[in-house]
Amino acid sequence: MNSIRTTRRALMGGAAGLAALGGRSAWAAALPALPASPVALTVMDVGGDLQLTQAIINAYAKANPRLVSGITFSQAPAPELAGKLKAQQAAGRVDIDLVLTGVGGMSAGVAENLWIPIVSDYAAALPNLEDIYLPGAWKMQGLAQNQGVCDVFSPAGPILEYMPDAVKQPPKNTQELLDWTRAHPKRFFYANPANSGPGATFLMGLPYLLKDKAPMDPASGWDNTWAYLVELGKNIEYYPTGTAATMKELGQGSRDIIASQLGWDLNPRILGVVPKEAEVIVLEGFHWVTDAHYWAIPKGVSNDHLAVLLDLIKYMLSKPAQAMTYDKGYFYPGPAVKDVPLTMAPEESQRLVGEYARPYYPKLIAEVPVEVTLDSDKLLYAYDRWNQQVGARVGR
C-alpha cells in the first residue's frame, strides 16, 4: 500500500491518501492535467446514490485537499436532469460537475448526448472495468455506452413487499395479484418507473412473469404486459413520483402491498420507515431484473475539474470504497466490484445488513435467472408508453 501511495504522490504532485487506493500507477499523456490549485466540485444526485456514496466522496476530498477545496451536493428528480443539462450546455455554462444517477437518468443522458464518454476517451485514468466488475455489473456497464461508470449494483427485483397482518394470503402469481387488487382497491401501488428502481424492475419483470413473446422488446413484444398494467391500474389510486413515498405509505398502513427490490426491502426497515416485520414475496416464474447506479460527467466540464473527477471515480472503484456501499442495505448487496465481501464493510454495515437481510436471498440470487435492464432506447420507449398508456389513466 505504501508503494502505491508513493507512486501516486510523485505522479499527482502530492495528492495521496484514499485516492491512491484506486487506479493504475500512471496517467496517459492525453489525460487532462491535475489542477495546480484545488477546485470546488458540484455533485447532483438524481437516483438516491448519495445515500451510498456521499461519505466516500467526502473522504476523498478530505484526503486530497490539494485537489478539492469543497463539494456542493444537490438532488433532483431524474426526469428533470436532461432538460437542465441541455439548457446549461446550450448557454455554455455547465455548473454540474458530476451526476449520480440510476438507469433512467443515465439512459436519458445517453439519448441526449449529454455525457463525456469517459470510459473510451479516458480509459487510461480508470481500471480495466471488465476485469474488476461482477458479471452483472459488467453487463449493466454496457448500458452506459462508455459515457458513465457503474458504481453500485444489485440483482434488484421485482419483489413484492407486504404487511403480514393485513395480507394473510399474499398473491403467488400475477393473476392472484390482479385479483387481490380488485378485491382490495387502492391497497396496492408502485412508483413511476422512470424515477423508481422498484417501479422500473416491476415494469421490466412483468414480461417474464406473463410469458410475453419478447421480454426485451417493449414496442412489439409486451402485449400481455401492457394489457396487464392497464387492468392493474384500474385498482391503483395514484403513482408516486418516487419509491420513498411507497415505503412511507406501507409503513403508515395506507397500502398493504407495494413493488419493491432488495435494497428497498432492507433500508426502510433498518431506518424504521417500514416495520421490521414486513415480508416479501416473489411471484411464480419471476426473473431478476438487475439495477445499477452510475457516475457521469456532463459535457462542458472544465479540464481541471475533469482531471479531479476521473481520479475520484477511480477511487470509487477501489475495494475499500466499494465496501462502504453496503451502507445500511440501501442497494443491497451494493458493490459493483468483485471480491468485496460484507466482512470488508464498516462494522455498522456488517451488523445491520447481517440482521435485516433475508436468509433466503443468497439462494434466490444464485438460482433465479438474471436479466439485464433494457438498453437506453427501449427503456425510454417503455417509460414513455407507460406514461401515456398506464400512468395517464390511473384509476380507469
Image: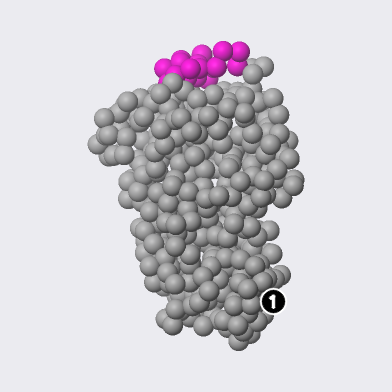
- Identify the residue at image location x=50%, y=25%: 282
Q: Which amino acid does label 1 sit on?
A: Pro
Q: The N terminus lies in which quarter of the figure?
A: bottom right
Asked if 144 appears above or below 37 in the picture, the reply is above
Asked if 206 appears above or below 126 in the picture, the reply is above
- Identify the residue at image location x=53%, y=20%: 185
Mark 1, residues whose alpha carbon is within 10 Å: few (<14), some, or many (≥20)?
some
User: How far across and how far down the image is residue 316, in percent?
Assistant: 58, 61
- Identify the residue at image location x=50%, y=34%: 365
Give the quarter of the image for residue 206.
Answer: top left
Give the quarter of the image for residue 359.
Answer: top right
Which of 310/79 is in front?
A: 310
Q: Mark 1 points at which residue?
A: 65
User: How far across and how far down the image is residue 307, in percent?
Assistant: 52, 76
Q: How is the protein colored in the picture?
A: one colour
User: How far across and how far down the image is residue 10, in percent?
Assistant: 60, 83
Looking at the image, how many numbered discs can be counted on the residues? Answer: 1
Residue 87 seen in the current view: no
User: How far across and how far down the image is residue 300, in percent?
Assistant: 45, 75
Q: Residue furthest bottom?
A: 36
* Residue segment shown in magenta: 167-186
- Identify the residue at image location x=41%, y=63%: 147
Q: In this view, does 377 lie to the left or right of 180?
A: left
Q: The C terminus lies in which quarter of the figure?
A: top left
Which of 43/80 is in front?
A: 43
Asked if 128 appears above or below 342 in the picture, the reply is below
In the structure shown, which secondary structural element does the residue marked by tag 1 occupy?
A: loop
